[in-house]
Amino acid sequence: MLRRIALAVVALVALGVVGLGALLVAAHVGIRRERAPLPAPAELNAAAAASAASGPVRLWVVNTASQSMPRSAVLERRDDPDPQAPFAMSYPAFLLQWADGRMLLVDAGMTRDAAVEFGRPAELLIGAGPVAPLGSVGERLGSAASKLQGIVFTHLHSDHVGGIADVCRVSAHPVRVPMSPAQAQRTNYTTAPSLRLLTAAPCVRLDLLRDGSLLPVPGFPGVFIIPSGGHTPDSQIVVVFVGGPDGPRRYAFIGDLVNDIDGIEHDLPKPWIYRTLIIPEDDTRMAELRRYLRGLRDQDGFTLLPSHDQRQIEASGVPAWTAPASPGGRRES
């Protein structure tokens, strides 16, 4: 009897290993198919010129949580020239506003409870500090939620999408979510749950865009999507031209294509275990994207905003969002 039970357990474990292996192989095969052409500088310059008079006029960061952790958790330690440097992981959304008041989010961060749960494995496994939840986007928008008309996602991982529940809770009208065909139609086991969450969210209206290398976002002039792949099949660079006195300022929201800006500075990948066994990435495409993003920064004047590099976001000069004052003069929470 005991032998039969033991054999059954072994068989179940073997089936689980085979199933997990199949998921990993399928994810690695899928991510290698996402190598769309990247737009040339001339195409980006034309987009900037077209956006000069109609693009967004304000940009803020709304950080939903923060967590200190070893830099070796986000960069391949073997080639890192400064492995002991401190690293703080942020979980932000970014908020854009146009002259007529309409607003668009880039990513939605997480709720307080989800942030604590999301950060716990890093505490237990890699020595990260406890997560400091800072409040969901829905909480922190306050009365400005009435102006929110859309959300663009850099990719569909839960720490970028999980805040949608609180957004719907405070939104009084539908929120458009423009998606490239890759984001709307091609998922893997790491992104499919978030697509289901968005499909079920009561306030979300999915908006399928046409395919291409630089996709304008309808209704939000000055915002463009570059389907990138590399990290997940649905990963995309969100390019934004924000109006200023000296012409549009150029920003590229790059999600998790790198987690620390030094990944671009020193052409460093993420740790092997992460990019092979946890989130299957395309090493060849990721190296191409790091070089492309460095060119956007150094030759084309873009400010790069990786989602999880709190230091880089703070150094970028993008101001932190402060909720508008309530009629009684208090700041809304």
Image (cartoon, rainbow, N blue to C red):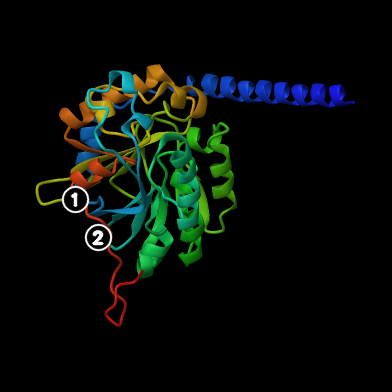
**To which quarter of the image does residue 123 belong?**
top left
Q: Are marks 2 and 1 in contact (CB under 8 Å)?
A: yes
At label 1, the amino acid type is Gly
Q: Amino acid at mark 2?
A: Ala
Percent x, y of residue 37: 36, 22
Left or right, 217 with respect to 296, comes to right
User: Which residue, as the protein is rendered here, is positioned at the far right?
Assistant: 1
Farthest-out residue, top: 284
> Label 1: which residue?
243
Any part of residue 41 in sight: no
Q: Residue furthest bottom?
A: 328
Give the x, y percent position of residue 183.
49, 36
Tell me which label, 2 or 1, sits earlier in the chain.
Answer: 2
In the displayed structure, 216 sits above or below 327; it is above
Q: Nearer the viewer, residue 174 or 64?
A: 64
**Residue under the point 45% across and 45% down:** 119
Q: Residues within 10 Å of mark 2 (few under 14, many from 20)?
A: few
In the structure shown, which secondary structural element does the residue marked by tag 2 occupy? loop
Query: What residue lies at 40% left-to-right and 58% top-to-bottom?
Result: 137
Q: Tell me the residue that label 2 is attached to.
A: 99
Position of the N terminus, as image quadrant, is top right
